[in-house]
Image: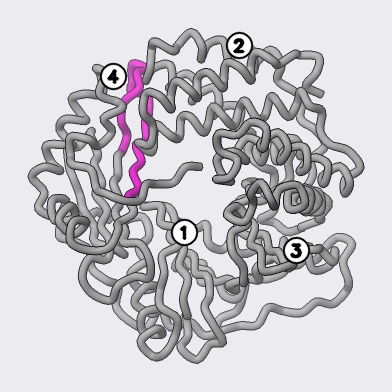
Amino acid sequence: MLRAPPSYPHPAGPAGRTTPQAIHMTFGSGPARPGSAAQPGSFPSGRAGGVDGADAVFAFLDPVESLRPALQAMRDHLGRNHLFLAIGEQQALASPIRERRLATFARDAQGRWRFKRIYLSYQPEGPLPRSGFRGHTFFYTPKRGELLDAPFPADPGLPSAGRVVDGMEHAAAAGGAPVEVLRYVPMRRLTLRGRCDAAGPGPDIVKVVEGKDAGPIAARIAAVSDAATWAGASFRVARVKECRAERGVFVQECLPGRPLAGEIGPDALEAPLRRIGAIHAEIHALHAAGPHVGALKDPWPTVVERLDWLAFVRPAHAEIFRAVAARLEAARPAPGEPVFCHGDFRCTQILADGGNWSVIDFDDAGYGDASLDVGRFLAFLKYDVPALAGSPELLEQAAAAYLDGYAGRAGRVPASGTLRWHRTSQEVLYLAQLVRRDLADEAAFAAGCAELDRLSAGLRPGETR
């Protein structure tokens, strides 16, 4: 029997505790699914619907002259790849396909921005089919000029993914829940819903992560679950049921409920947002402990880097990005007293099952400035809740209700100037991610620039703490 990650003593918790129940996982029972012969060793995620032709891939970056040769070389490879062309035919004949793209960048020896890697991933929506098209990812490395492809679930960065999917499909064939891909970030993370054991009581959430991250992440989530239980929290945190750190895999219980973001609307706005604010304050009052519950990473260096990169991508807007950088630097707040933070607290991370709510994805939790956690939530509110898009009045009403709920539980909220600073920083990261994920067009980019200019122009150095 496999055991869940060890639990770490809470500094003020009870002497005894209940050990998470161990389960038997079947994903290691079969051989790894082979890749192709060419296979090597709360942000915007992806698009659903039609599959673009090769010439449309990262078309937003076409005006960047220094990137154009690498882009054209990649498109030439795609245009000659029969698998890429077949995916377009699959889209015309079968179910919808979700497409995810990402371009990463690095500076060369002369300090110039260049492509590091580009990937395009295609996944059918709904339960994973047992046969036919199951997904495919293309990896392009400009430095080597190679296009490598891997049929799902083969992934050079997630070598256990094939065995995990094989085991879950074996359990499904024996009467378990069908396997569903909830999220797939090539080279980094695969999140699945389904049974690990045909004899189990119901579906599980299975995560396959890169490198040696599984053990620390599972231990961190277990510590959060313990802390929430000891505190008598008003929300649930999914228990860690099993961890195989050597394979980069861990399992959590599958909590009931629907994503809250889709339940919020003009007729159901203030009450849920107040409760969200109160829950966020509860999280900030938790005392999660353990060697893998550390300090959150300071996002400021990444914000500075992204502003410089955005100016490279669109020199016509460089003056705005330089102004935003200067305003953020001048008003940069001193860090507040560290509290426990979710790290990515958004409406999309809350499940509602009637009056019972759960908070998920504590993978990146740690201790940090509460104002960063709150500012991030406010920045993403308009992106996460469809009903708030395009309605400044509803957005302001929702934000006020959230802050009212937070203050009612915590007794105070971070200074408004500090929240504005963190909201501006998060908008920088969001705009850069739109471009990096090939989700930007000229209108969306111009709107993002205008929002950054507006938010940063309101920053005052004396009002950020």
Q: Please name the residue shown 83% across and 51% down the image.
A: 285
- Magenta span contains residue 106: yes
Residue nearest the viewer, comparing 119 with 222: 119
Disc 3 marks which amino acid? Answer: Phe
Q: CA distance from mark 4 to mark 1?
A: 34 Å
- Dot 3 and dot 2 residues touching (CB under 8 Å): no
**Which is closer to the viewer, label 3 or label 2?**
3
Q: Which mark is residue 239?
A: none
- Give the magenta part as a residue range: 99-117
Q: Is residue 363 visible?
A: no
Question: Which residue carries the number 1 mark?
Answer: 209
**Which is closer to the viewer, label 3 or label 1?**
3
Identify the mark nearer the N-term, 4 or 1.
4
Q: Please name the residue shown 52% across and 78% down the image.
A: 203
Question: Which residue carries the number 4 mark?
Answer: 64
Left or right: residue 110 versus residue 228 is: left
Question: Which residue carries the number 2 mark?
Answer: 326
Q: CA distance from mark 3 to mark 2?
A: 40 Å
